[in-house]
Image (tube, rainbow, N blue to C red):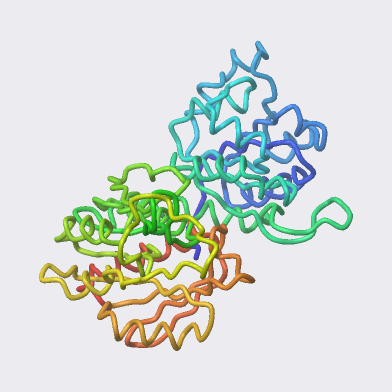
Amino acid sequence: MSLTMSLKGKRILLVIGGGIAAYKSLDLIRRLRERGVRVRVVMTRAAQEFITPLSVGAIAGERAFTDLFDQASELEVGHIRLARETDLVVVAPATADRMAKMTQGIADDLAAAVLLATDKKILLAPAMNPQMWAHPATRRNHSRLISDGRLFVGPNKGEMAESGEAGIGRIAEPLEIVAAIEDVFSMEPERIALAGRRMLVTSGPTREPIDPVRYISNRSSGRQGHAIAHAAARAGADVLLVSGPVEIPDPEGVKTVHVETAREMLEAAEAALPVDAAVCVAAVADWRAEARAREKLKKTGDAPLALSLVENPDVLARISHHALRPKLVVGFAAETEKLLENARAKLKKKGCDWIVANDVSDQSGVLGGEANQIHLVTEKGVESWPLQTKEAVAGALVKRIADALRRGANS
């Protein structure tokens, strides 16, 4: 999705973390310098176990900085100047350890101090073993960094350095990182793309109580909806996020209303109107128990419990047909079969302008996962997007929403 632009004259501070992927940073430096970028480099102690400051300095055209307590370095440049005299900070490879330190605000080496002291955007290119990337601690740190406004490229899926290891954790290729850097600078004019606009986003699951202990729900993590809310806020919109119960932090720069049930979500969504655009990403439970038991239901030893269900209100349809209907209403269709057929039917039935369709079958890994492949369904047809991170989907969708509002909504 890169909007290729000239990087000539840009200043980039590259933080090289430890890991076998550090060798790719040499090619990244070369690619950036070919485009007229001035590259300053900070190397962690672990990075120096894989590549040398001498080789890095030779390619970068100036010495690599390695030590927080190097008197010559502090007199010559200083970690504060390193942090500030740049247009962008890139961390490649970004290890699990580096991500954890950034989340906690630890500043125990030069790289950590620079990352804490900078007032510039930070782009991370993670690289680690797939098990480390999938670990709950890394997942929490990843979500926290996104909420803090940090940007990511990768990791990719593929073979690891370890024999027989494969999965998600491979660092993005140097040219992919260059494209992501171009995107960061291209985004600057987009910061005001939604300025003055109000947006409503619903996200996460709902929980419909059966008794004080049990409830009906689903496996939605809220990652896609939260990413869309965050991307819209970064584009200048005044965003209200109505979130069901999730385990990820509220997005930065977004007003968030927390709800539990479908009826609470509808009430909060309707209270947010009028808005320019509504994006209904939440996986709202279709049914609820007709009556909630006051006490925990017990086994009787006889026939299984008969649970009487009633339909929940349809949040997307209600917003689409509301007297204060937004100029643009976008719904999501999470399907396990007949994806496009069901999405087209939902577009017509709900009365919305667009449907974002995605496959949520077990093999897709979308529910609770980091990536998504969507199909944008409108009256004009279907546009299939490539598999990409949920943050990338969010950024591209928000850009499309801004363009549509600028042209007069649902086009």
Query: Measured from the top left, where is residue 205 in percent x and y?
Result: 41, 59
- Please state which of residues 52 and 233 is positioned toward the viewer in this rendering: 233
* Residue 3 visible in the shown view: no
Give the quarter of the image for residue 380.
bottom left
Q: Is 116 on the left or on the right of 243, as rendered?
A: right
User: Vertical placement of 298 versus 382: above or below?
Assistant: above
Give the quarter of the image for residue 114.
top right
The structure residue drawn at horizontal position 25% and vertical position 74%, both measured from the top left corner, is: 317
User: Vertical placement of 380 versus 35: above or below?
Assistant: below
* Residue 331 visible in the shown view: yes
Query: Measured from the top left, where is residue 35 in percent x and y?
Result: 58, 52
Q: Is 98 on the left or on the right of 26, as rendered?
A: left
- Please state which of residues 59 and 143 is positioned toward the viewer in this rendering: 143
- Please state which of residues 403 and 72 is positioned toward the viewer in this rendering: 403
User: Vertical placement of 336 versus 390: above or below?
Assistant: below
The structure residue drawn at horizontal position 35% and vertical position 65%, both measured from the top left corner, is: 289
The structure residue drawn at horizontal position 32% and vertical position 47%, both measured from the top left corner, is: 258
Farthest left residue in view:
323
The structure residue drawn at horizontal position 89% and vertical position 54%, both measured from the top left corner, is: 163
Query: Measured from the top left, where is residue 409 in percent x and y?
Result: 22, 73
Quick one: quadrant of the C terminus? bottom left
- So how many labels did they put on this image? 0
Query: Measured from the top left, where is residue 108 in percent x and y?
Result: 63, 20
- Please state which of residues 362 and 166 is positioned toward the viewer in this rendering: 362
Q: Is 238 on the left or on the right of 136, as rendered?
A: left
